[in-house]
């Protein structure tokens, strides 16, 4: 347990620190003179791209780790020489980083161990771990994610982090929880006009807005990265217009935004550019329409668009073949695993350990692990359920509570939009508008699965704009005294309700086996089409959602059963293959013949069924 905790948090802290150093160096190279709040996001995007480039070199994960460490040292030293006021700028976001890191630890504290986030909720992580394991040791047939052009920047980061000594599962968990910490660090430094306590609150809420926390809870890391890139991209555009000393000047002014766009390609492939590109277009149009200093700033930056486009094109060129492959399969999701049961849970529930929601999901390529369209009102951040898929009234809380919370969130957002417009935050509003437009297009023309991802992208911008206004005393100045008291009280209620909603998600987040290895998937071609029994340690099955997790791993079998060790006697009737997880070398039943092993998983064949 201690080793897993160290591996998880050392990985997360190392990625946040390296991202901050790399991003600061890139911004300094672009002409910045002060440490920018956006440095961690810029560096995270660069790290994801560099990791994918280097993990395919000899040495694989170790090579990537050494390159990233060297890049962080060089970029950090360069930034320290070129930038002013680095120490105080580094200290400002530290409380937000600690708060979010503690919040992301809630699922592990509740479950009592560290492991795979989302087990029993989202069935995809096993494929991601298998791909990351192959990147670290590319022997045999490459996984389908590699062959199909799936963006593997985070997987490469996990392979590099595993070289620090952590199990790959733990490394991937650390790489995942680092992302909301990066968002919190960025926002903790960007909200300078608020007091430290208020900035801490807004940064924490935006980093773990209800839908963002929901995607973290199901281990859907790719969407978290893209949302972080959207926030960082918008704040960079803001600094380009209002604080160029923190964003850069001249022909390289759009270097950092181009790096974020490149990172989006290596994390989310070509769809990742949609949010950033539309936000940029809307921001440029808003600047031109507004006139004055804003228009002059936008016009001055237009030549830099060419340099930014060149940087993005150079970064994307090595991936064109994979981007094309991914484009032919985007939107495809996993089918339901044999024998798996989706989790649920409403307010006060147990995240799938108690009663199920009234409606069970239809697992297909349109729904994935959803029950149907995700309710768009959940984007406002107040949704009293541990499962974002639950409709009002389907959980433990009456439907009117959902709608009242959504109404409060909508009012907070409306007030926040007005306040942001008064502050001249056109970049943040452009990001919000871009996310809303893409969600609407997905809702109309795409699948519920895709629309849900698009809705999650809007969650952090919505919470940032709404919570910022709710806790900003300056936003109340234009109001009359009576109305200012009412709005202040409503803002406080919104913040508390949003915090409780996100906390409920994290409390109910499932955590899978803490000692997962990809051995079952590596042996899948040897039990495909056969009735298969998997035996795992009793605590893994009973306490760590082993039945749900390995049920997904056994999806290639004609029939699948998961049970606890030990076996004994004759194998169950109708079973032709037996898998034993945990490294035991002795046969669990009589009349078995060993036919394979991988990563502490042994595969046996029932002798009577041998053809």
Image (cartoon, helix red, strand yellow):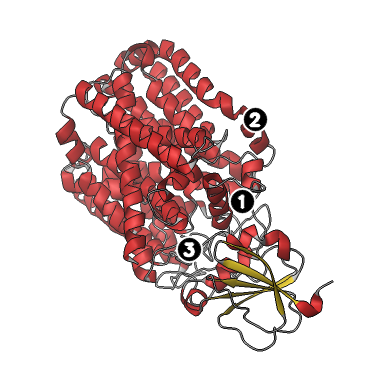
Confirm or deny contact between disc 3 and disc 2 (CB under 8 A): no
Measuring from the top left, give residue 422's x and y in whole percent. Answer: 28, 30
Q: CA distance from mark 3 to mark 2?
A: 37 Å
The kind of secondary structure element at disc 2 is helix
- Among the 4 quarters of the image, the one containing residue 347: bottom left
Query: Residue at label 2?
Result: 321
Above or below, comparing residue 49 to residue 289 in the picture: below
Q: Which label sits in the foreground, 3 or 2? A: 2
**Residue most extreme to the right:** 611
Q: Look at the numbered disc 3 and give the secondary structure of its residue.
A: loop
Left or right of 116: which side holds 113? left
Along the line of sight, the residue nearer the viewer: 593 or 388: 593
Q: What is the spatial separation of the Cα atoms under label 1 and label 2, in whole angstroms?
A: 28 Å
Q: Label 1's element?
A: helix
Residue 529 at what x, y percent from top left?
Answer: 77, 65
Q: Residue at the location (48% across, 29% down)?
A: 262
Query: Can residue 166 be seen from the camera position used here?
Result: yes
Q: Which corner quadrant of the image does residue 534 belong to?
A: bottom right
Task: Give the mark nearer the N terminus: 1 vs 3.
Answer: 3
* Residue at x 29%, y 17% (from the top left corner): 31
Q: Is residue 561 above or below residue 421?
A: below
Quarter placement of the C terminus:
bottom right
Relative to 528, 487 lies left or right: left
Task: For label 1, count other residues whose C-alpha is less than 10 Å away and answer few (under 14), some (14-19) or many (20+).
Answer: many
Tell me the crowding category of disc 3: few under 14, some 14 to 19, or many 20 or more residues within 10 angstroms, Cα based: many
Q: Which residue is mark 3?
A: 387
Q: Residue at x 37, y 32 (%)?
A: 42
- The residue that mark 1 highlights is 448
Residue at x 64% of width, y 44% of height: 446
- Left or right side of 310 for 420: left
């Amino acid at each position: 347990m201690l080793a897993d905790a160290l591996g998880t948090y050392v990985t997360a802290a190392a990625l946040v620190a390296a991202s901050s150093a790399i991003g600061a160096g890139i911004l300094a190279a672009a002409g910045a003179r002060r440490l920018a709040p956006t440095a961690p996001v810029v560096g995270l995007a660069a790290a994801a791209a560099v990791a994918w480039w280097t993990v395919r070199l000899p040495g694989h994960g170790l090579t990537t780790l050494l390159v990233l460490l060297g890049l962080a040292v060089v970029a950090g030293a360069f930034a320290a020489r070129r930038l002013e006021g680095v120490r105080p700028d580094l200290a400002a976001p530290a409380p937000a980083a600690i708060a979010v890191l503690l919040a992301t630890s809630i699922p592990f504290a509740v479950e009592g161990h560290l492991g795979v986030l989302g087990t029993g909720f989202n069935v995809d992580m096993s494929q991601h771990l298998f791909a990351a394991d192959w990147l670290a040791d590319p022997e045999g047939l490459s996984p389908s994610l590699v062959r199909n052009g799936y963006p593997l920047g985070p997987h490469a980061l996990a392979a590099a982090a595993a070289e620090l000594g952590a199990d790959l599962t733990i490394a991937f968990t650390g790489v995942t929880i680092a992302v909301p910490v990066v968002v919190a660090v960025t926002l903790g430094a960007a909200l300078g006009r608020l007091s430290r306590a208020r900035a801490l609150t807004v940064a924490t809420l935006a980093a773990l807005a209800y839908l963002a926390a929901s995607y973290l809870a199901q281990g859907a890391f790719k969407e978290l990265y893209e949302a972080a890139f959207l926030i960082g991209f918008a704040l960079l555009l803001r600094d380009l217009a209002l604080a160029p000393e923190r964003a850069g000047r001249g022909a390289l002014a759009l270097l950092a935004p181009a790096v974020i766009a490149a990172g989006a390609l290596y994390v989310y492939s070509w769809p990742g550019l949609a949010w950033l590109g539309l936000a940029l277009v809307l921001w440029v149009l808003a600047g031109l329409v507004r006139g004055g200093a804003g228009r002059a700033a936008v016009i001055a930056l237009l030549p830099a668009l060419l340099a930014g486009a060149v940087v993005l094109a150079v970064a994307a060129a090595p991936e064109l073949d994979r981007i094309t492959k991914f484009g032919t399969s985007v939107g495809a999701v996993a089918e339901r695993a044999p024998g798996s049961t989706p989790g649920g849970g409403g307010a006060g529930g147990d995240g799938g350990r108690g009663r199920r929601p009234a409606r069970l999901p239809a697992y297909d390529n349109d729904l994935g692990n959803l029950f149907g369209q995700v309710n768009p009102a959940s984007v406002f951040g107040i949704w009293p359920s541990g499962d974002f898929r639950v409709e009002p009234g389907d959980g433990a809380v009456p439907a009117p509570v959902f709608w009242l919370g959504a109404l409060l969130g909508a009012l907070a957002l409306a007030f926040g939009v007005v306040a942001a417009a008064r502050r001249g935050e056109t970049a943040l509003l452009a990001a919000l508008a871009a996310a809303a437009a893409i969600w609407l297009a997905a809702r109309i023309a795409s699948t519920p699965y895709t629309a849900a991802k698009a809705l999650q992208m809007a969650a952090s911008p919505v919470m940032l704009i709404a919570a910022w206004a709710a806790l900003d005393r300056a936003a109340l100045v234009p109001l009359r005294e009576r109305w200012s008291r009412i709005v202040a009280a409503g803002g406080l209620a919104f913040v508390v309700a949003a915090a409780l909603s996100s906390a409920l998600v994290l409390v109910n987040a499932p955590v899978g086996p803490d000692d997962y290895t990809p051995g079952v998937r590596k042996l899948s071609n040897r039990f495909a089409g056969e009735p298969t029994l998997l035996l795992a340690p009793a605590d893994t099955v009973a306490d760590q959602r082993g039945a749900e997790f390995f049920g997904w791993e056994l999806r290639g079998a004609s029939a699948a059963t998961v049970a606890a060790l030990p076996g004994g006697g004759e194998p169950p009737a109708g079973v032709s293959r037996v898998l034993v997880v945990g490294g035991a070398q002795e046969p669990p039943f009589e009349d078995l013949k060993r036919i394979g092993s991988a990563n502490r998983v042994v595969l046996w064949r029932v002798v009577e069924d041998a053809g």
